[in-house]
Amino acid sequence: MKLKYTLKKKEKNTGARLGTIEWNGKEFMTPMFMPVGTQATVKTLSPEEVKECNSGIVLANTYHLWLRPGEDIVKEAGGLHEFMNYKDGPILTDSGGFQVFSLANPKDITEEGVRFKNQYNGDELFLTPEKSIAIQEALGSDIMMSFDECPPASASHEYLENSIKRTLRWAKRGKDAHKTEDQMLFGIVQGGPYEDLRSYSAKETVKIGFDGYSIGGVANDGESKEDMYKAIIYSTPYLPEDKLRYLMGVGDPIDIVEGVIRGIDIFDCVLPTRLARHGNALTNRGKLNIKNAKYKKDFTPISETCDCYACKNYTKAYIHHLIKCEEVFGQRLLSIHNIRYLIHLTEEIREAISKDELLEFRDRFIEEYYENQ
């Protein structure tokens, strides 16, 4: 069954939107944070634990699954939902572009596709828009992404202009190659911090016609928050109101709030599990480094107001002990908390939008978030 998005409400004073996603008889609300399961697993967590965080869509990585175990094996298993046992919500696969371009040299990027080396064994690989779509169709995700170039934040206006035009040609080729009726395909808007390039990319991508639209190139190293917000502002006015809007690779709590204000519906990021592996917890008062000695005798939960499994059952002192001893259970507890924290944040954002109070929520949130930093 093809996923269906419905816009339910637009806030009066911002670009914020409330919507619903219907999938296999279930309904999910947007704005939404989507946990990342790069290798068909959210790191250290079971699908049941992810679902207990009230997850909706989860992500899997096309590039990594193409190389290991291979899309044919996933297809033989019955697709990603069966393979990773995530049957309670939709799955989104990226195009593999972000990973490929981190491995390729500029000379390896041609009109036909991108040539690069397999990071695991050094074999030469060639990925094209058509191949990316074919892999994603075999994986059986509910939302697929177009294959696009992911230029660095330092790319010049001239480079970005040429890159966008090639990405548009790739987007058209990918759409023409898309054959499955039950999988959505999203187009991706690029253009760095430049208004003319973002608007051009958005308009031309919409002309091709996709099931939803993503704003890419906003999670690059070296990019400022100001440039990120510009990219959103310069893109969203040209995107259809009745289609999902996805800000790729963004999971900082404040960026989620600011992104929603500017018209974004769904977000993803590896941030919650990556922070957890380094002993950090997300809270309304900023990040806590649980490794700090002050938590050795702190017998309170990470957050008194959090309803996650970790906060209901364990203390900062215990998690501090686990992290210091390099026990994986500590990473798991922090991952559960961080994912639930970001999902709960989007639940609070939805409540604020329903009351037309998102700007007030944003101001209170930022003040509290930075209070102890």
Image (tube, rainbow, N blue to C red):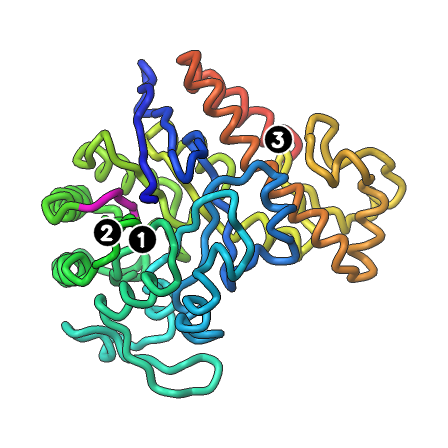
Is residue 34 in the magenta section?
no
Give me the C-alpha separation between circle 1 and circle 3.
Answer: 27 Å
Disc on the earlier residue, 2 or 1: 2
Residue 195 in picture, x, y percent from top left: 18, 42
Residue 270 in picture, x, y percent from top left: 52, 53
Residue 211 in picture, x, y percent from top left: 24, 43
Give above or below for 245 relative to 71: above
The disc label shown at residue 217, or none: 1
Q: Secondary structure at mark 2?
A: loop
Seen at 21% across and 59% down, the residue is 178
Nearest the eye: 5 or 275: 5
Image position of 95 (left or right of 165): right
Q: What residue span does the magenta drawing correspond to?
A: 210-215
Give me the C-alpha separation between circle 2 and circle 1.
Answer: 6 Å
Local packing at callout 2 (Cα closer than 10 Å; few below 14, some 14-19, many 20+) is: many
Secondary structure character of the magenta stretch overall:
strand
Label 2 with label 1: CB-CB less than 8 Å: yes
Q: Which residue is mark 2?
A: 190
Q: Secondary structure at mark 3?
A: loop
Amino acid tagged 3: Asn
Q: Quadrant of the N terminus?
A: top left
Residue 269 visible to an observer of this rendering: yes
Seen at 30% across and 51% down, the residue is 183
Nearest the eye: 217 or 59: 59
